[in-house]
Image (cartoon, coloured by chain):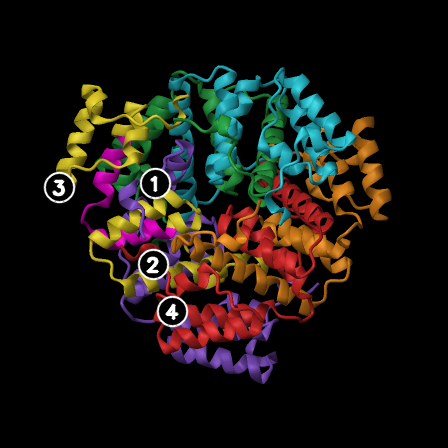
Chain colours: A red, B orange, C green, D yellow, E purple, F cyan
Amino acid sequence: MPALELIEYAEASPEVRAVYDDIMATRKTDFINNFWKALARDPATLRRTWESIKQIMGPGALDPLTKEMIYLAVSATNQCRYCIASHSASARKKGMTDEMFGELMAVIGMANETNALAVGYQVEIDEQFQTS
Amino acid sequence: MPALELIEYAEASPEVRAVYDDIMATRKTDFINNFWKALARDPATLRRTWESIKQIMGPGALDPLTKEMIYLAVSATNQCRYCIASHSASARKKGMTDEMFGELMAVIGMANETNALAVGYQVEIDEQFQTS
Amino acid sequence: MPALELIEYAEASPEVRAVYDDIMATRKTDFINNFWKALARDPATLRRTWESIKQIMGPGALDPLTKEMIYLAVSATNQCRYCIASHSASARKKGMTDEMFGELMAVIGMANETNALAVGYQVEIDEQFQTS
Amino acid sequence: MPALELIEYAEASPEVRAVYDDIMATRKTDFINNFWKALARDPATLRRTWESIKQIMGPGALDPLTKEMIYLAVSATNQCRYCIASHSASARKKGMTDEMFGELMAVIGMANETNALAVGYQVEIDEQFQTS
Amino acid sequence: MPALELIEYAEASPEVRAVYDDIMATRKTDFINNFWKALARDPATLRRTWESIKQIMGPGALDPLTKEMIYLAVSATNQCRYCIASHSASARKKGMTDEMFGELMAVIGMANETNALAVGYQVEIDEQFQTS
Amino acid sequence: MPALELIEYAEASPEVRAVYDDIMATRKTDFINNFWKALARDPATLRRTWESIKQIMGPGALDPLTKEMIYLAVSATNQCRYCIASHSASARKKGMTDEMFGELMAVIGMANETNALAVGYQVEIDEQFQTS
C-alpha cells in the first residue's frame, strides 16, 4: 500500500529532484528528511510547501531561531510528534540552548493552561482589547 | 447565574486584592483584565496562575516579547479568541511591529498546515531525529 | 440562508416534535435549547444524537454530575463556547458548586499544560504504563 | 492491566459477537480491526458506535468515498494516527487514487493554515456570512 | 490599534489591489471578504495564501464542492467560527444542499467522537493498516 | 542529542532529588515516571509543575478519582498518548473500574461529537445560558 511510500532521490522525477536539490542547497546538507520524501508523492504540494517554508522561515523581522520556536509551540499544542522531533532538531542547530528550550516549553504549557481557563470561565474580551 | 461574574477590586477579598495589587505593580498599570477578575472566583487558581505567569513570562534565556509571540502561537492554534486579543495587546506593548506580527502569523499558519500534512501522510520520524 | 435557521416546535415535523417532546419530558422542562433546534434541520442526526446523549448522560457507574464535568473538560479543551455555556448550566442544575467548578477548571487547565509538555519533551511511555 | 485488552471473536460474548458478525457482513470481510476489539470491553458503546457508523457512512446525499475523505480531514486535524491509518485504508478500498489523496491533503493542510490565520488576525464574520 | 484593521480596496497598495482584483475576477464577484482584508496588512502572506487557495480549491481529481466540505470538516474540528461561516457560504454557492450539509455534519461529528475513543482506548494500529 | 534525555535519581541534582523524593513520598511508591525525568532538565518547571499537580489533584470539593477522569477527558481530546497511558494507570489505582472507564469514554466521545456539531451548525448561545 502506498500510504507510507517515501520517494528517494534515485527514483524521483526531475520535478521532485529539483525541489530536493534546492532543499539540500538551502540547508547546506545532503539529508532530505522523511516529510519531504512523503510529500513527494504529490509534487505540486511538495513544491508549494517547500517554497512557502523557505520564504517564511528565513530571516526577516523575526530571526530564524525565533521562528523555529514558534513552530514548536504550534506543534506541541497540536500534539504532532513528527513535527516536534524535526523542529526540535532544527531549533538546536540554529542555537537553541537547553535553557531556552526549558523556557519555551514553560510558556507553551502555561499558554495551553490559560487558553482552557479563559474559555472555561467564559471570559469576555475587555473593551481595552477590542480594536477598531 | 455566577458563570460570568467578574470580581472587581472594590468587592474583592484581601487575598484576591493582594494578587490584583501585585499584577498592577508588576505591570505598572491600574488595569486588571477580565481574565483575572474571572479567576478570582477561585482564589487558589488566581494566585497559582498569576505566580506562574509572572515567573514564566519575565526575562530569562528568552526575552519577554518572544514569549508573548509563543503565547500567540499556542492561542491561534487553539482558536482561543480571548487569548489572542489579550496577548496581541501585550505583544504590541512589548514592541511587536506590524512586520513582526505578519511574520509570526505566517509561521503559525505554515506550522498548522505542515502538522496536518505530517500526520496525514503518516510520516515516520527519521532516525536522525531519534534521540537518546 | 438556512445556516442559522432554528426549527421551533410550532413549525416542526411530527418526527422532530417527538424528539422535542422526549427532551422536555426527560429533562422536566419546557425549554428546548438552540442546539437541538439547529440539529432539527437533519432529523436523523437530531434523533441519533439525542438518543445517545440520553443513554450516556444518565446515571450509571458514574453519576450525572461527574459526566457533566467531563463534558466541560472536553469543551474547554476544544474551545467550544456554546458547549461551555450550555453544559455549565446543566452542571449547575445538577449540583455543581462554585468550589467544584473552581477545582474542575484547575484540573482542566493543568491537564492541558502537561499534555503540551509531555509531547514537547518527547516523553516515551513508561514500561509500567505499557499494557498487554 | 486491561487498558489494551482486545476482545477476540472466540472469547466474545454473544452481544459482542452479534456486532462483529454485522461488521463482517456489512463490510464483506472476515477482518475485525482493533478499534472494535477495544470498544468491545464496553458492549453498549461498541453497539452504539457501530450502528451510528453504519448509518452515517453508507451512501446518501454524499457518496461513501467522500465521507471517508471527510473522516480523514477530521483525523488529520486531530492528529489521530490510528484513525488516519484505518480510514486511509478504507478510502483506498473505496477508490481513492493517489491524486485524490494528494489533493485531499492539500486542502486539509490549507484549511488548517487559514483557520489559524483567521483567529490570529481576529477576523470578524462578514455581514454577508451572517445568517438568519 | 491595528489588530482588526481591514484594508479596503480604495486605500490598498497596488500589490494588494492586484490580489483583490484576481480574487474578484476568479470568483466572478465584487465582494472581498474580511479574511483577505485582514491578511492585506501583510501583502506577502496575502499573495501566498490566495495563490495557494486558488490552486488548491479549483477543480482537479476532487471537485470544488467536495473540497469545500473537507474545508468545513477541518474548520468544525478546530472550532473556527469565521471559517465555518465563510466556507458554509461557499459550499452553498457550489451546490451543497441541506441534505448534504446534514450528512457532512453527521460524519464530522462521528469522526470527532471516534478519534477520541481511539486514543482513549489506546488502540494499536492493526498490521493490515501498517504500510511499507 | 538531549531531546529524550531522562534524568535518573542517581545523577540528579539536589534540587531535582528533592522533587523526586516528594513525588515518591506523596504517592507512596519508589517509581518516578518518565514525565518527571524529562521535565527534570528544567528544574524550575519540574518543581512548579509538581507543586501544582500535588495541590490540584488531591482531595477537595472533587475526589481524586473524579479529577483523574477529568484529566483523561482532556488528554483524549488532545490526542496525548503519554497522558492517556499514565493517567489511565493512575485512575485504575484510584479505583476506576472497567464500567466506569467505559462510561467515561462514552461521555468523552459524545462531547467531542457535539462540540463539532455545535460550531458546524453555528449554534448561537441561548439567552438562558447567557450569564451576568
Q: Is residue F73 above or below residue A64?
A: above
Chain at tag 4: E
Q: Residues within 10 Å of mark 1 (few under 14, many from 20)?
A: some
| Residue located 38% across and 28% down the image | D4
Q: Relative to E70, is B3 on the left or the right?
A: right
Chain at tag 2: A
Q: CA distance from mark 4 to mark 1?
A: 31 Å
Q: Nearer the viewer, residue F16 or D118?
A: F16
Q: CA distance from mark 2 to mark 3?
A: 28 Å
Q: Say the numbered circle drawn on residue D28.
A: 3
Label 2 secondary element: loop
Task: Specify whether disc 4 shares its chain with disc 1.
Answer: yes
| Residue located 35% across and 75% down the image | A13
Task: Specify whether disc 3 shares its chain with disc 4.
Answer: no
Task: Specify whether disc 2 shares its chain with disc 4.
Answer: no
| Residue located 79% across and 47% down the image | B58
| Highlighted magenta segment, given as a residue range | D48-73
Q: Which residue is mark 4?
A: E56
Q: Position of residue C18 (x, y in %)?
A: 25, 31
Q: Which residue is mark 2?
A: A5
| Residue located 63% across and 52% down the image | B84
Q: Say the numbered circle drawn on residue E125.
A: 1
Task: Specify whether disc 2 shares its chain with disc 3.
Answer: no
Label 3 secondary element: loop
